Amino acid sequence: MSTGPTGPFRFQPAAGTLPNLPTGFTGTALVSIDDLQTAVGAPIVSSQDKYMAQFQSMFTMDPESTKTALVQWVQSGSPPMFPIWTCIVPGGGQLCSDGVFRNGLGFVLFCLNMSQDSVESTLSAMFPGITVTFALFSGVLTVAVSI
């Protein structure tokens, strides 16, 4: 029983069996790479803008509701890590406008255009004498206070 040829094998079609392929395109371009980058880039930037506004709201907390939360914190015995502001962070990596996938805290810091130290010092200045923690737990960005 023969199993076919052994050794190097090269496909060579019989003469005249391949279709005639065009040698050059002379029509109108359908889509350019610039069109594709614009189409893909626009939603990325608008998504970042949406989250950036949410993340930046931690620096513009409503004074009355924040004061109410802090009074509740003190009345409950000032437990550590008492949350005064939260925000959902999208799960899975997010493609940022610079073409880099970031997740979690990296995405938050990219959207804020701040380092973690800058965020923490800004929050600490908002609440003199109170220890402020900025953290991400299970997809929830939290600003919490402690004594």
Image (tube, rainbow, N blue to C red):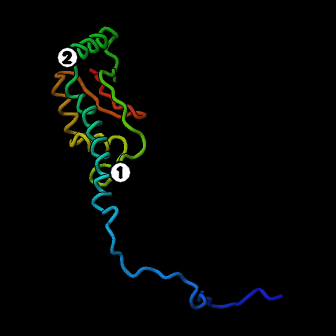
Which quarter of the image is occupied by the N terminus?
bottom right
Question: Where's residue 84, x and y in %?
Answer: 30, 21
Image height of 84 relative to 8, above or below: above
Name which residue lies at 52% across and 81% down.
Answer: 19
Would residue 84 appear left or right of 119 to someone viewing this image?
Answer: right
The residues bearing labels 1 and 2 have C-alpha atoms spaced at a distance of 35 Å
Question: Where's residue 121, x and y in %?
Answer: 18, 33
* Disc 2 target residue: 63
Name the one closer to the observer, 5 or 21: 21
Name the one closer to the observer, 12 or 126: 12
Name which residue lies at 59% across and 87% down.
Answer: 13
Residue that protrudes farthest toward the front in the picture? 27
Would residue 60 appear left or right of 21 to someone viewing this image?
Answer: left
How packed is label 1: few (under 14 Cα within 10 Å), some, or many (20 or more)?
few
Name which residue lies at 36% across and 79% down.
Answer: 24
Query: What element does badge 1 sit on?
Result: strand
Question: Where's residue 6, x and y in %?
Answer: 69, 90
Query: Which label's residue is closer to the chain start, 1 or 2?
Result: 2
How packed is label 2: few (under 14 Cα within 10 Å), some, or many (20 or more)?
few
Question: Where's residue 108, x and y in %?
Answer: 30, 40
Which quarter of the image is occupied by the C terminus?
top left
Looking at the rendered structure, the kind of residue marked 1 is: Phe
Residue that protrudes farthest toward the right in the picture? 1
* Disc 1 target residue: 101
Looking at the rendered structure, the kind of residue marked 2 is: Pro
Image height of 71 relative to 140, above or below: above
